[in-house]
Amino acid sequence: MLTVCSTIQVSGQLTARNTDGKVATMYANAYGNRDTIFVFNQTPQPKSGNLYLKLSELSTFKWYKFDYETKDFEEEPFFIDEDVEETSFNDLQQGGYKVIATILDEEEPRDTTFIAWLYMNPGFEFNILKDNNGELMYNYKNCFYNDFRLSSNTVQSSFTYYNPYNLQIGALPPFVNRITYNIRRNNESEIVIPLNTQGLIQYLRDFDPPYEDTQYHFRAFDMFNVVRRDEIMYRSIIPFAVIDTLLPRKDSKSAPVPVKFTNKPYNVSEYVWRFGTGDSVVYNLGNIAPDTIEYTYYTPRRQGYQVTLKVTSLSGCQFTTEPTIITVDDPVLDVANVFTPNNDGINDYFKPHAVSLRGFEIWIYTRTGKRVYYYKGDNLRDWEGWDGRIEKSGREAPNGVYYYTIKALGWDEPATKNPPTGPYSGFVYLYR
Protein backbone atom coordinates (compact mmCIF):
# COMPACT_ATOMS: atom_id res chain seq x y z
CA MET A 1 0.00 0.00 0.00
CA LEU A 2 0.97 3.66 -0.35
CA THR A 3 3.24 5.07 2.33
CA VAL A 4 3.85 8.83 2.18
CA CYS A 5 6.02 10.98 4.41
CA SER A 6 5.28 14.39 2.88
CA THR A 7 2.14 16.37 3.60
CA ILE A 8 0.95 16.18 0.00
CA GLN A 9 -0.25 12.75 -1.11
CA VAL A 10 0.98 11.57 -4.47
CA SER A 11 -1.04 9.13 -6.55
CA GLY A 12 0.98 5.93 -6.77
CA GLN A 13 1.50 2.51 -5.26
CA LEU A 14 4.53 0.33 -4.65
CA THR A 15 3.54 -3.08 -5.92
CA ALA A 16 5.05 -6.34 -7.20
CA ARG A 17 4.56 -8.58 -10.19
CA ASN A 18 4.02 -12.37 -10.19
CA THR A 19 3.59 -12.58 -6.46
CA ASP A 20 2.04 -15.59 -4.72
CA GLY A 21 0.13 -13.45 -2.26
CA LYS A 22 0.25 -10.42 -0.03
CA VAL A 23 -0.46 -9.53 3.58
CA ALA A 24 -1.01 -6.12 5.19
CA THR A 25 1.43 -4.98 7.86
CA MET A 26 0.35 -4.50 11.46
CA TYR A 27 1.34 -0.82 11.41
CA ALA A 28 -0.25 2.04 9.45
CA ASN A 29 1.55 4.70 7.43
CA ALA A 30 1.08 8.46 7.57
CA TYR A 31 -2.18 8.29 5.66
CA GLY A 32 -3.71 5.57 7.83
CA ASN A 33 -3.11 2.87 5.23
CA ARG A 34 -1.12 -0.28 5.84
CA ASP A 35 1.99 -1.16 3.92
CA THR A 36 2.13 -4.47 2.07
CA ILE A 37 4.13 -7.65 2.62
CA PHE A 38 4.52 -9.32 -0.80
CA VAL A 39 4.97 -13.09 -0.76
CA PHE A 40 7.13 -15.11 -3.18
CA ASN A 41 7.03 -18.90 -2.84
CA GLN A 42 10.41 -20.64 -2.84
CA THR A 43 8.91 -23.94 -3.94
CA PRO A 44 8.88 -25.82 -6.24
CA GLN A 45 11.67 -23.47 -7.46
CA PRO A 46 13.26 -20.52 -5.66
CA LYS A 47 12.10 -17.05 -6.64
CA SER A 48 13.56 -13.60 -6.16
CA GLY A 49 11.36 -10.65 -5.47
CA ASN A 50 10.55 -7.54 -7.44
CA LEU A 51 8.93 -4.17 -6.82
CA TYR A 52 7.38 -1.66 -9.17
CA LEU A 53 6.21 1.93 -8.80
CA LYS A 54 4.56 4.28 -11.29
CA LEU A 55 3.69 7.96 -10.80
CA SER A 56 1.97 10.43 -13.08
CA GLU A 57 4.87 12.91 -13.06
CA LEU A 58 8.53 12.76 -13.89
CA SER A 59 10.48 11.88 -10.78
CA THR A 60 13.77 10.69 -9.42
CA PHE A 61 13.46 7.38 -7.54
CA LYS A 62 15.97 6.34 -4.88
CA TRP A 63 15.88 2.76 -3.56
CA TYR A 64 16.94 1.82 0.00
CA LYS A 65 17.13 -1.58 1.72
CA PHE A 66 16.31 -2.26 5.36
CA ASP A 67 19.38 -3.14 7.43
CA TYR A 68 18.48 -5.73 10.09
CA GLU A 69 21.68 -5.03 12.06
CA THR A 70 20.99 -1.31 12.50
CA LYS A 71 17.22 -1.93 12.39
CA ASP A 72 16.75 0.97 10.00
CA PHE A 73 16.95 1.66 6.29
CA GLU A 74 20.43 2.13 4.87
CA GLU A 75 21.60 5.70 4.43
CA GLU A 76 22.80 5.26 0.85
CA PRO A 77 20.49 4.11 -1.95
CA PHE A 78 21.45 0.96 -3.80
CA PHE A 79 19.71 2.11 -6.99
CA ILE A 80 18.60 5.41 -8.55
CA ASP A 81 16.21 6.04 -11.45
CA GLU A 82 16.20 9.63 -12.76
CA ASP A 83 13.69 11.66 -14.80
CA VAL A 84 11.15 8.83 -15.28
CA GLU A 85 7.52 8.22 -14.36
CA GLU A 86 8.04 4.63 -13.29
CA THR A 87 10.72 2.49 -11.68
CA SER A 88 11.23 -1.18 -10.89
CA PHE A 89 13.85 -3.54 -9.54
CA ASN A 90 14.18 -7.31 -9.85
CA ASP A 91 16.19 -9.95 -7.99
CA LEU A 92 15.33 -8.54 -4.59
CA GLN A 93 15.87 -10.68 -1.52
CA GLN A 94 13.68 -11.00 1.56
CA GLY A 95 13.40 -7.86 3.66
CA GLY A 96 12.16 -4.29 3.68
CA TYR A 97 12.48 -1.75 0.88
CA LYS A 98 11.93 1.99 0.73
CA VAL A 99 11.58 4.09 -2.41
CA ILE A 100 11.82 7.88 -2.11
CA ALA A 101 10.28 9.58 -5.14
CA THR A 102 11.35 13.20 -5.76
CA ILE A 103 8.86 14.86 -8.08
CA LEU A 104 10.54 17.34 -10.40
CA ASP A 105 8.41 20.39 -9.76
CA GLU A 106 9.48 23.77 -11.25
CA GLU A 107 8.77 25.59 -7.99
CA GLU A 108 10.01 23.09 -5.37
CA PRO A 109 10.85 19.36 -5.57
CA ARG A 110 8.59 17.18 -3.40
CA ASP A 111 9.67 13.90 -1.74
CA THR A 112 7.25 11.03 -1.16
CA THR A 113 8.23 7.77 0.55
CA PHE A 114 6.90 4.32 -0.33
CA ILE A 115 7.66 1.22 1.78
CA ALA A 116 7.04 -2.48 1.17
CA TRP A 117 8.32 -5.79 2.55
CA LEU A 118 9.19 -8.99 0.71
CA TYR A 119 8.67 -12.43 2.25
CA MET A 120 10.35 -15.41 0.62
CA ASN A 121 7.97 -18.21 1.65
CA PRO A 122 10.03 -21.39 2.25
CA GLY A 123 6.89 -23.56 2.40
CA PHE A 124 6.57 -26.16 5.13
CA GLU A 125 7.41 -29.75 6.00
CA PHE A 126 4.69 -32.35 5.92
CA ASN A 127 5.23 -36.06 6.51
CA ILE A 128 2.89 -38.59 8.12
CA LEU A 129 4.59 -40.85 10.64
CA LYS A 130 4.49 -44.45 9.35
CA ASP A 131 5.82 -47.85 10.29
CA ASN A 132 8.42 -49.68 8.22
CA ASN A 133 5.74 -50.91 5.83
CA GLY A 134 4.40 -47.43 5.14
CA GLU A 135 1.31 -48.13 7.27
CA LEU A 136 -0.40 -46.40 10.17
CA MET A 137 1.07 -47.63 13.43
CA TYR A 138 -1.19 -49.83 15.55
CA ASN A 139 -0.92 -47.52 18.57
CA TYR A 140 -2.34 -44.64 16.54
CA LYS A 141 -5.66 -46.32 15.72
CA ASN A 142 -8.56 -47.45 17.87
CA CYS A 143 -12.25 -48.30 17.58
CA PHE A 144 -13.39 -44.68 17.38
CA TYR A 145 -10.80 -42.71 15.45
CA ASN A 146 -7.44 -42.79 13.70
CA ASP A 147 -4.59 -40.42 14.56
CA PHE A 148 -2.29 -39.48 11.70
CA ARG A 149 0.74 -37.84 13.29
CA LEU A 150 3.16 -35.44 11.66
CA SER A 151 6.84 -36.30 11.88
CA SER A 152 7.73 -32.60 12.25
CA ASN A 153 6.06 -29.28 12.86
CA THR A 154 5.13 -26.92 10.10
CA VAL A 155 7.94 -24.51 9.21
CA GLN A 156 7.65 -20.78 9.81
CA SER A 157 10.21 -18.57 8.10
CA SER A 158 12.53 -16.34 10.14
CA PHE A 159 10.92 -13.35 8.44
CA THR A 160 10.54 -10.27 10.64
CA TYR A 161 9.68 -6.66 9.93
CA TYR A 162 9.51 -3.32 11.76
CA ASN A 163 7.36 -0.25 11.98
CA PRO A 164 9.54 2.32 10.12
CA TYR A 165 7.66 5.18 11.80
CA ASN A 166 8.45 3.95 15.30
CA LEU A 167 11.51 1.71 15.25
CA GLN A 168 11.69 1.75 19.05
CA ILE A 169 8.80 -0.72 19.16
CA GLY A 170 11.13 -3.40 17.87
CA ALA A 171 10.32 -6.30 15.58
CA LEU A 172 6.64 -6.90 14.90
CA PRO A 173 5.26 -10.44 15.07
CA PRO A 174 5.15 -12.00 11.60
CA PHE A 175 1.82 -13.19 10.25
CA VAL A 176 0.84 -16.83 10.76
CA ASN A 177 0.98 -18.83 7.56
CA ARG A 178 -1.98 -21.11 8.23
CA ILE A 179 -1.86 -24.68 6.93
CA THR A 180 -4.99 -26.49 5.76
CA TYR A 181 -5.16 -30.28 5.50
CA ASN A 182 -7.37 -32.39 3.25
CA ILE A 183 -7.80 -36.14 3.55
CA ARG A 184 -9.07 -38.44 0.82
CA ARG A 185 -9.77 -42.15 1.28
CA ASN A 186 -9.05 -44.15 -1.85
CA ASN A 187 -11.28 -42.52 -4.48
CA GLU A 188 -13.59 -40.66 -2.13
CA SER A 189 -13.99 -36.89 -2.14
CA GLU A 190 -11.64 -34.83 -0.02
CA ILE A 191 -12.61 -33.83 3.48
CA VAL A 192 -11.01 -31.01 5.43
CA ILE A 193 -9.56 -32.05 8.79
CA PRO A 194 -8.50 -29.38 11.30
CA LEU A 195 -5.04 -29.60 12.83
CA ASN A 196 -5.15 -30.64 16.47
CA THR A 197 -2.25 -30.16 18.85
CA GLN A 198 -1.29 -32.03 22.01
CA GLY A 199 1.80 -30.34 23.44
CA LEU A 200 4.51 -30.63 20.82
CA ILE A 201 2.69 -33.39 18.92
CA GLN A 202 0.55 -32.45 15.94
CA TYR A 203 -1.94 -34.88 14.54
CA LEU A 204 -4.83 -35.23 12.13
CA ARG A 205 -7.76 -37.22 13.50
CA ASP A 206 -10.36 -39.12 11.49
CA PHE A 207 -13.37 -39.90 13.66
CA ASP A 208 -14.88 -42.37 11.19
CA PRO A 209 -12.36 -45.17 10.66
CA PRO A 210 -13.35 -47.47 7.77
CA TYR A 211 -13.86 -51.21 8.16
CA GLU A 212 -11.86 -52.01 5.04
CA ASP A 213 -8.13 -51.57 4.48
CA THR A 214 -7.84 -48.08 3.07
CA GLN A 215 -5.18 -45.92 1.47
CA TYR A 216 -5.33 -42.40 2.91
CA HIS A 217 -4.16 -39.54 0.69
CA PHE A 218 -3.21 -36.25 2.35
CA ARG A 219 -2.86 -32.82 0.82
CA ALA A 220 -1.58 -29.88 2.85
CA PHE A 221 -1.46 -26.31 1.57
CA ASP A 222 -0.64 -22.95 3.09
CA MET A 223 -2.16 -19.50 2.55
CA PHE A 224 -0.09 -19.03 -0.61
CA ASN A 225 -0.82 -22.39 -2.29
CA VAL A 226 2.37 -24.20 -1.42
CA VAL A 227 1.25 -27.83 -1.56
CA ARG A 228 2.68 -30.94 0.10
CA ARG A 229 1.35 -34.49 -0.31
CA ASP A 230 1.74 -37.75 1.54
CA GLU A 231 -0.13 -41.05 1.82
CA ILE A 232 -0.38 -43.95 4.24
CA MET A 233 -2.06 -47.36 4.33
CA TYR A 234 -4.55 -48.05 7.11
CA ARG A 235 -5.08 -51.70 8.05
CA SER A 236 -8.55 -51.75 9.54
CA ILE A 237 -9.37 -53.02 13.02
CA ILE A 238 -13.07 -52.15 12.66
CA PRO A 239 -15.55 -55.05 12.31
CA PHE A 240 -18.54 -54.85 10.03
CA ALA A 241 -21.36 -57.11 8.91
CA VAL A 242 -24.37 -56.95 6.60
CA ILE A 243 -27.40 -59.22 7.03
CA ASP A 244 -29.26 -60.64 4.04
CA THR A 245 -32.50 -62.59 4.63
CA LEU A 246 -34.12 -65.32 2.57
CA LEU A 247 -37.76 -66.35 3.15
CA PRO A 248 -38.10 -69.51 1.08
CA ARG A 249 -41.94 -69.63 0.98
CA LYS A 250 -44.47 -67.42 -0.77
CA ASP A 251 -46.65 -67.33 2.37
CA SER A 252 -43.58 -66.09 4.21
CA LYS A 253 -45.47 -64.62 7.18
CA SER A 254 -47.52 -67.70 8.05
CA ALA A 255 -46.08 -69.72 10.94
CA PRO A 256 -43.87 -71.60 11.01
CA VAL A 257 -41.58 -69.09 9.25
CA PRO A 258 -38.14 -70.50 8.39
CA VAL A 259 -35.58 -67.80 7.62
CA LYS A 260 -32.06 -68.03 6.26
CA PHE A 261 -29.75 -65.25 7.44
CA THR A 262 -26.55 -64.63 5.50
CA ASN A 263 -23.83 -62.37 6.82
CA LYS A 264 -21.04 -60.59 4.96
CA PRO A 265 -18.36 -59.94 7.60
CA TYR A 266 -15.17 -57.89 7.69
CA ASN A 267 -12.48 -58.14 10.40
CA VAL A 268 -14.67 -60.33 12.62
CA SER A 269 -13.45 -62.73 15.32
CA GLU A 270 -16.75 -63.22 17.18
CA TYR A 271 -20.39 -63.26 16.06
CA VAL A 272 -23.44 -63.00 18.28
CA TRP A 273 -26.75 -63.63 16.51
CA ARG A 274 -29.85 -62.44 18.37
CA PHE A 275 -33.13 -63.58 16.84
CA GLY A 276 -35.54 -61.40 18.83
CA THR A 277 -37.06 -64.35 20.68
CA GLY A 278 -34.55 -64.50 23.50
CA ASP A 279 -32.51 -67.06 21.58
CA SER A 280 -28.97 -66.25 20.53
CA VAL A 281 -26.04 -68.04 18.94
CA VAL A 282 -22.38 -67.20 19.51
CA TYR A 283 -19.53 -68.04 17.17
CA ASN A 284 -15.87 -67.21 17.76
CA LEU A 285 -12.45 -68.35 16.65
CA GLY A 286 -13.07 -71.69 18.36
CA ASN A 287 -16.20 -72.47 16.31
CA ILE A 288 -16.05 -70.82 12.92
CA ALA A 289 -19.25 -69.04 11.93
CA PRO A 290 -21.07 -70.31 8.83
CA ASP A 291 -21.96 -67.83 6.12
CA THR A 292 -25.64 -68.78 6.45
CA ILE A 293 -27.63 -69.58 9.57
CA GLU A 294 -31.26 -70.77 9.73
CA TYR A 295 -33.90 -69.99 12.33
CA THR A 296 -37.63 -70.77 12.40
CA TYR A 297 -40.28 -68.53 13.96
CA TYR A 298 -43.50 -70.10 15.27
CA THR A 299 -45.33 -67.65 17.50
CA PRO A 300 -47.26 -64.88 15.73
CA ARG A 301 -46.01 -61.35 16.32
CA ARG A 302 -47.28 -58.68 13.98
CA GLN A 303 -44.89 -56.03 15.29
CA GLY A 304 -42.10 -58.36 14.27
CA TYR A 305 -38.97 -59.92 15.72
CA GLN A 306 -35.84 -57.78 15.67
CA VAL A 307 -32.86 -59.76 14.42
CA THR A 308 -29.39 -58.32 14.99
CA LEU A 309 -25.83 -59.49 14.50
CA LYS A 310 -23.17 -58.15 16.85
CA VAL A 311 -19.61 -58.65 15.65
CA THR A 312 -16.29 -58.11 17.42
CA SER A 313 -12.82 -57.77 15.92
CA LEU A 314 -9.57 -59.13 17.32
CA SER A 315 -8.86 -55.61 18.60
CA GLY A 316 -12.06 -55.64 20.65
CA CYS A 317 -13.95 -53.19 18.42
CA GLN A 318 -17.65 -53.96 18.08
CA PHE A 319 -20.39 -53.33 15.56
CA THR A 320 -24.09 -54.20 15.68
CA THR A 321 -26.22 -54.29 12.55
CA GLU A 322 -29.43 -52.37 12.23
CA PRO A 323 -32.37 -54.63 13.25
CA THR A 324 -33.85 -56.85 10.56
CA ILE A 325 -37.60 -57.27 11.17
CA ILE A 326 -39.25 -60.67 10.74
CA THR A 327 -43.05 -60.67 11.11
CA VAL A 328 -45.32 -63.66 11.76
CA ASP A 329 -49.07 -63.29 11.12
CA ASP A 330 -51.79 -64.15 13.62
CA PRO A 331 -53.74 -67.39 13.08
CA VAL A 332 -56.53 -67.06 10.50
CA LEU A 333 -59.04 -69.58 9.13
CA ASP A 334 -61.19 -68.49 6.17
CA VAL A 335 -63.62 -71.06 4.68
CA ALA A 336 -65.21 -70.67 1.23
CA ASN A 337 -68.81 -71.76 0.70
CA VAL A 338 -68.56 -73.17 -2.83
CA PHE A 339 -66.15 -75.17 -5.01
CA THR A 340 -66.30 -76.74 -8.51
CA PRO A 341 -64.29 -79.99 -8.80
CA ASN A 342 -64.59 -80.30 -12.61
CA ASN A 343 -60.85 -80.49 -13.36
CA ASP A 344 -60.78 -77.13 -15.15
CA GLY A 345 -57.97 -75.95 -12.88
CA ILE A 346 -60.16 -73.35 -11.21
CA ASN A 347 -61.50 -73.88 -7.67
CA ASP A 348 -61.27 -77.67 -8.02
CA TYR A 349 -60.59 -78.27 -4.30
CA PHE A 350 -62.35 -77.37 -1.12
CA LYS A 351 -59.49 -76.10 1.02
CA PRO A 352 -59.94 -73.46 3.73
CA HIS A 353 -57.45 -70.59 3.67
CA ALA A 354 -55.31 -71.03 6.79
CA VAL A 355 -52.56 -68.83 8.27
CA SER A 356 -50.23 -69.76 11.15
CA LEU A 357 -52.04 -73.01 12.08
CA ARG A 358 -50.19 -75.92 13.63
CA GLY A 359 -53.13 -78.32 13.88
CA PHE A 360 -56.11 -78.96 11.58
CA GLU A 361 -58.92 -81.57 11.48
CA ILE A 362 -61.96 -81.58 9.16
CA TRP A 363 -65.07 -83.73 8.74
CA ILE A 364 -67.43 -83.40 5.74
CA TYR A 365 -70.97 -84.87 5.68
CA THR A 366 -73.91 -85.09 3.37
CA ARG A 367 -77.14 -83.42 4.43
CA THR A 368 -78.30 -86.79 5.73
CA GLY A 369 -75.27 -87.06 8.02
CA LYS A 370 -73.17 -89.52 6.04
CA ARG A 371 -69.46 -88.76 6.23
CA VAL A 372 -67.82 -88.37 2.83
CA TYR A 373 -64.39 -86.99 3.81
CA TYR A 374 -62.00 -86.71 6.74
CA TYR A 375 -58.47 -85.20 7.13
CA LYS A 376 -56.17 -84.53 10.03
CA GLY A 377 -52.71 -83.00 9.81
CA ASP A 378 -50.18 -80.62 11.28
CA ASN A 379 -49.14 -78.97 8.03
CA LEU A 380 -51.85 -77.61 5.78
CA ARG A 381 -49.25 -76.76 3.15
CA ASP A 382 -48.99 -80.52 2.37
CA TRP A 383 -52.78 -80.96 2.05
CA GLU A 384 -54.34 -80.35 -1.34
CA GLY A 385 -57.90 -80.21 0.01
CA TRP A 386 -61.08 -82.21 -0.74
CA ASP A 387 -61.34 -82.98 -4.45
CA GLY A 388 -65.07 -83.80 -4.28
CA ARG A 389 -64.68 -87.60 -4.14
CA ILE A 390 -66.19 -89.87 -1.51
CA GLU A 391 -63.53 -91.27 0.78
CA LYS A 392 -62.44 -94.89 0.31
CA SER A 393 -64.65 -95.48 -2.77
CA GLY A 394 -63.14 -92.72 -4.87
CA ARG A 395 -66.50 -91.99 -6.49
CA GLU A 396 -67.43 -88.44 -7.29
CA ALA A 397 -69.81 -86.91 -4.77
CA PRO A 398 -72.96 -85.55 -6.41
CA ASN A 399 -73.71 -81.85 -6.70
CA GLY A 400 -75.34 -80.41 -3.63
CA VAL A 401 -74.86 -78.99 -0.16
CA TYR A 402 -72.43 -80.55 2.30
CA TYR A 403 -71.87 -79.90 5.97
CA TYR A 404 -68.37 -79.55 7.47
CA THR A 405 -66.88 -79.41 10.94
CA ILE A 406 -63.32 -78.12 11.57
CA LYS A 407 -61.05 -78.10 14.55
CA ALA A 408 -58.00 -75.82 14.26
CA LEU A 409 -55.17 -74.80 16.55
CA GLY A 410 -52.92 -71.78 16.09
CA TRP A 411 -49.21 -71.66 16.92
CA ASP A 412 -49.92 -69.23 19.76
CA GLU A 413 -52.40 -71.56 21.50
CA PRO A 414 -53.40 -71.45 24.26
CA ALA A 415 -52.17 -67.90 24.78
CA THR A 416 -54.64 -66.05 22.55
CA LYS A 417 -57.17 -68.66 21.42
CA ASN A 418 -57.11 -67.06 17.98
CA PRO A 419 -58.70 -68.87 16.28
CA PRO A 420 -60.42 -70.90 19.01
CA THR A 421 -60.03 -74.65 18.84
CA GLY A 422 -63.46 -74.97 17.34
CA PRO A 423 -65.32 -76.79 16.18
CA TYR A 424 -66.13 -74.56 13.24
CA SER A 425 -69.10 -75.65 11.22
CA GLY A 426 -70.82 -74.53 8.04
CA PHE A 427 -72.04 -75.49 4.59
CA VAL A 428 -70.23 -75.75 1.29
CA TYR A 429 -71.84 -76.06 -2.13
CA LEU A 430 -70.39 -78.54 -4.63
CA TYR A 431 -71.00 -77.82 -8.32
CA ARG A 432 -69.42 -79.61 -11.26
Image (tube, helix red, strand yellow):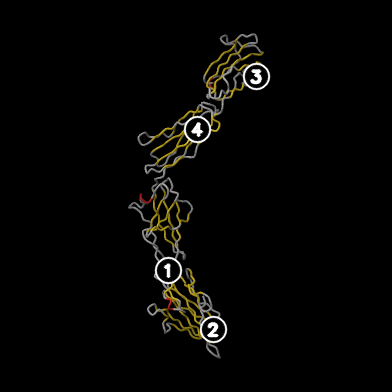
Q: Earlier in the sequence, mark 4 or mark 3?
A: 4
Front-most of 131 and 139?
Answer: 139
Which type of secondary structure does the marked residue at label 3 adopt?
A: loop
Disc nearest the viewer among 3 and 2 = 2
* Cβ–Cβ under 8 Å for marks 2 and 1: no
Q: CA distance from mark 1 to mark 3?
A: 94 Å
Which residue is situated farthest in the left direction here?
Answer: 132
Q: CA distance from mark 2 to mark 1?
A: 35 Å
Q: Earlier in the sequence, mark 3 or mark 2?
A: 2
Disc nearest the viewer among 4 and 3 = 3
- Please indicate, yes or no, whether residue 285 appears anywhere in the rendered image: yes
For badge 1, the amino acid type reads Asn
Rendering coords of residue 192 (x, y %): 47, 56
Front-most of 213 and 294?
Answer: 294
Residue tagged 1: 121
- Please indicate, yes or no, whether residue 413 appears anywhere in the rendered image: no
Front-most of 162 and 93?
Answer: 162
Disc nearest the viewer among 2 and 1 = 2
Which type of secondary structure does the marked residue at label 4 adopt?
A: strand
For badge 4, the amino acid type reads Leu
Q: CA distance from mark 2 to mark 4?
A: 89 Å
Report whether 392 appears left or right of 280.
Answer: right
Which residue is situated farthest in the front direction here?
Answer: 415
Residue tagged 3: 337
Q: CA distance from mark 4 to mark 3?
A: 35 Å
For badge 2, the amino acid type reads Thr
Q: CA distance from mark 4 to mark 1?
A: 63 Å
Give me the disc on residue 246.
Answer: 4
Mark 4 nearby-residue class (10 Å; few <14, some 14–19, many ≥20): few
Rendering coords of residue 264 (x, y %): 44, 38
